[in-house]
Amino acid sequence: MRPLADAQRDVLAAMRPLPEAEVGLLDALGLVLSRDVVAPHDVPPFANSAMDGYAIISADTSSAPVTLRVLEDVPAGSVPTAVVTPGTAIKIMTGAPMPAGADTVAEVEVTTPGTGAVVIGESVETGRSVRAAGGDLPTGEIVFLAGERLGPHHLGVLATIGVSSVPVRRRPVVAVLSTGDEVMPPDTDVLAPGAIRDANRPMLMAMLSELGVDVLDLGIVPDDETTLRAALHEGAERADVVLTSGGVSMGEYDLVKQVLTELGNVDFWRVAMQPAKPFAFGSIWGKPLFGLPGNPVSVTVAFEQFARPALLTMMGARRVFRSRIPGVLAEPIETSPYRTVFVRVAVSISEGRWLASPSGSQSSNVLSALARADAFAVVPVGIGDVSSGDGVELEMFRWPEQRTMEEVLR
């Protein structure tokens, strides 16, 4: 069987970045910067008050309490007109520009206002409650590097520096289809004997949408060569990537394997992993194709280990693999020493450690255990059975990517 890391390396080596595009700020969510972004001005653009209070000269409070004359009131959005001099103060609101002459802000909590004056009740050190111009981002600083995947907070930062058109790799389009005569739409009321509802396609479409990918739904394709060939041709013609589920094992009726062999350059691998040992990868009509297994848990594991990092690579991301953290198993697990095993676990904190407990049956068709899980406990080749209390790596599939291809596949 092919080692998992070798298979991942081959898949990622075949990916090519998608073309660049300029998109609006809100349309950039989930996409990846194609160029560095540099701050065109200071953020904040001017020194301002971090608190409601009074702008003063700190030396005036060395013998606090002290009474100072109030020159004016400056709310946020206004500009002070007076200059603070010894013995004076300006009432100021959070975010308002610091007036000339002032070097600190006495918070309203340490003051007692009077008519035209204010009592400062304690000594206030220089610079207290003052936000410096450029304290967040100085002019010319690289804000984000190319390869950064943009989340809501990235968009907020870009908004503060006036970026309205964001340079990114364009959003991929992924065609998804399920295969098999036994596979029925999810809304089927009554299943005929031998039939099952399609979980793979809705699940894949949801994972792709969560990733920020546009999905082309090709539906359920029966075990018919002509229909399957037409669906694959449509996917390759209209999408950047094609994802299939089912039909890639050694069964007599696994027509996906037969048709893909005719249509493109596709390899069928037995990867040393569990679940998701059977896996197909290659291209049809020049478009990458991922042939995922049929069981839903195997679909998810194959998607996480191959398709998701490949799509992020196409999108130009630097971090493409999920985070892994050290954890401890709460109970023993029997695994194969000949494969990398992905155990579905629920994760909690116990005595300062991440504690992992199997979230249900580990059979590759038991999707409910995956829905209850937070992570995969990853048991490498050569380990086999793991005892309660043993350490294990936890791949947090509910957490964002933190590891680069070089860190994982060095």
Image (tube, rainbow, N blue to C red):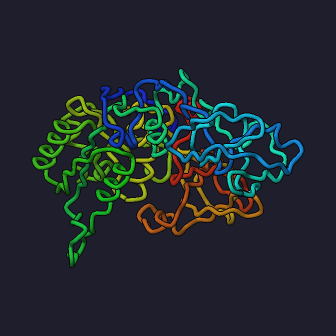
Q: Which residue lies furthest to the front in this view?
A: 115
Q: Residue at x 35, y 49 (%)?
A: 208
Question: Foreground residue, 250 or 203?
Answer: 203
**Drawn side of residue 205 relative to residue 50, left or right:** left
* 102 shown above or below 328: above
Query: Is any part of residue 148 visible from this angle?
Result: yes
Q: In this view, does 35 lie above or below 363?
A: above
Give the farthest residue toward the right.
Answer: 63
**Quarter of the rendering occupied by the C terminus:** top right
Q: Position of residue 230 (x, y in %)?
A: 12, 44
From this view, report whether residue 174 is shown above or below residue 177. above
Which residue does the image show at 61% across and 34% down from the upper left? Answer: 47
Q: In which quarter of the image is residue 345?
A: bottom right
Which percent across, then down, holds residue 358? 59, 65
Which residue is at 36% across, 27% downward? 17
Q: For the image shown, how many numbered marks are present on the structure?
A: 0
Query: Going by the picture, which residue comes out furthest to the top?
Result: 140
In front here: 262 or 88? Answer: 88
